[in-house]
């Protein structure tokens, strides 16, 4: 079986930390070219732009996009237009409209595409989803707090329009909860705390619900310090389910459960490989819709300026 010849656009932090190691560890893929505006990727041909890669580079079957959300829409469109399968980092685009247009273009092109909500592949998520399927949910508390200086050092884009600010990590929690719950969530209220020198929030409080009036609260914080808090607690009639460490740890009524040993990005690329094999796609817009709705209904509070 020939490996899937893979291009990658945007060789930045997550590409270096997660994507390239996961690609190199999966024999179904062969990384053959990178297009990036920063430091080059060793061991493959490097190009300054996707256009140059497509025009002058080695043949690729699929392309992974690890650029910032702003501008990513045009890049993915360019790849789809020439029939490439695409894996798109979260959030898929800077706007909901762009992401919806990509869904339509994927269908028109008949290629495989994945909006890679990486937190859905955390080790504890599948077991959590199975346990919850037969339970009666009462309330959900989400606490998603980390240090932007650790996870996005020097990344100005995250504070600019389309960069989402604290929703860039917060959307990971939303991707988990929308994967765990049976019914769609609605944003009832939100407070976005925006530094006076930024265009996107550094913290947010969100109140959500579903058609059965489930009480879902989320607290996001991007200035939390180095000991991350990435937890979701779901209270049910039958007991309490808790996900910690971004979904890597699952506890039920305080008892830690056995979970998958596969890492998030190994599972992401295994899923992408299966989609290509099945001539299928996985393009969920729900997490991005909740972010958009939080921006629609959210009150704004200006807070002290942020300096990296
Ligand atoms: N930083 C993190 O811990 C994580 C980030 N992500 C997501 O991955 C995406 C990228 O984030 P980071 O890697 O942190 O950002 P980054 O700023 O470190 O990397 C972005 C890369 O894209 C390149 N780039 C920008 N525009 C380009 C273009 N038109 N053509 C080619 N290359 C271009 C830049 O040169 C840079 O190397 C974001 O959507 C983020 O939400 C996902 C998981 C974790
Ligand atoms: O997707 C993302 O994950 C976090 C962090 O890398 C792990 O939670 C990062 O802030 C965000 O871009």
Image (tube, helix red, strand yellow):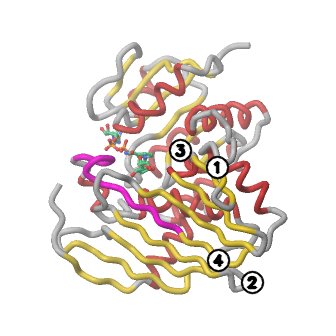
- Mark 4 in CB contact with mark 1 (< 8 angstroms): no
Residue 212 is marked as 2
Residue at the spot x=49%, y=27% of the render? 7
State which quadrant residue 208 falls in: bottom right
Residue position for label 3: 88
Q: Single out the mark in the foreground, 4 or 3.
A: 4
- Whole-angstrom CA distance, mark 2 to mark 3, is 33 Å
Residue 248 % position (x, y): 57, 46
Residue 178 % position (x, y): 65, 64
Q: Which of the image's four quarters has the C terminus?
A: bottom left
SS class, disc 2: loop
Residue position for label 1: 256
Left or right placement of residue 18 versus residue 177 in this view: left
Disc on the earlier residue, 4 or 2: 4
Residue position for label 4: 139
State which quadrant residue 156 falls in: bottom left
Disc on the earlier residue, 2 or 3: 3
Residue at the spot x=33%, y=47% of the render? 151
- Whole-angstrom CA distance, mark 1 to mark 3, is 33 Å
- Whole-angstrom CA distance, mark 4 to mark 3, is 32 Å
What segment carries the magenta color? 142-153
Q: Single out the mark in the foreground, 4 or 2.
A: 4
Left or right placement of residue 199 versus residue 28 in this view: left
């Amino acid at each position: 079986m020939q490996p899937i010849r893979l291009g990658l656009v945007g060789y930045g932090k997550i590409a270096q930390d997660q994507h390239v190691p996961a690609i190199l560890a999966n024999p179904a893929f062969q990384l053959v070219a990178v297009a990036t505006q920063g430091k080059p990727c060793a061991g493959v041909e490097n190009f300054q732009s996707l256009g140059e890669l497509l025009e002058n580079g080695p043949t690729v079957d699929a392309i992974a996009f690890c650029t910032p959300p702003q501008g990513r829409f045009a890049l993915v469109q360019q790849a789809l237009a020439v029939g490439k399968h695409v894996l798109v980092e979260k959030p898929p685009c800077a706007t909901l409209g762009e992401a919806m247009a990509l869904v339509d273009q994927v269908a028109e092109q008949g290629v495989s595409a994945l909006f890679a909500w990486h937190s859905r592949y955390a080790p504890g998520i599948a077991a959590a989803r199975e346990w919850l399927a037969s339970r009666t949910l009462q309330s959900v508390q989400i606490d998603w707090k980390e240090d932007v200086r650790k996870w996005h050092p020097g990344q100005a884009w995250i504070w600019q329009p389309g960069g989402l600010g604290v929703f860039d990590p917060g959307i990971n929690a939303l991707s988990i909860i929308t994967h765990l719950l049976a019914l769609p969530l609605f944003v009832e209220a939100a407070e976005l705390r925006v530094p006076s020198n930024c265009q996107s929030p550094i913290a947010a409080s969100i109140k959500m619900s579903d058609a059965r009036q489930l009480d879902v609260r989320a607290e996001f914080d991007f200035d939390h310090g180095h000991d991350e808090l990435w937890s979701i607690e779901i209270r049910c009639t039958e007991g309490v389910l808790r996900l910690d460490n971004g979904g890597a740890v699952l506890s039920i009524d305080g008892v830690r459960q056995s979970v998958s040993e596969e890492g998030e990005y190994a599972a992401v690329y295994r899923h992408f490989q299966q989609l290509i094999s099945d001539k299928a796609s996985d393009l969920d817009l729900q997490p991005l819709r909740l972010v958009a709705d939080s921006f629609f209904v959210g009150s704004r509070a200006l807070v002290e300026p942020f300096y990296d």
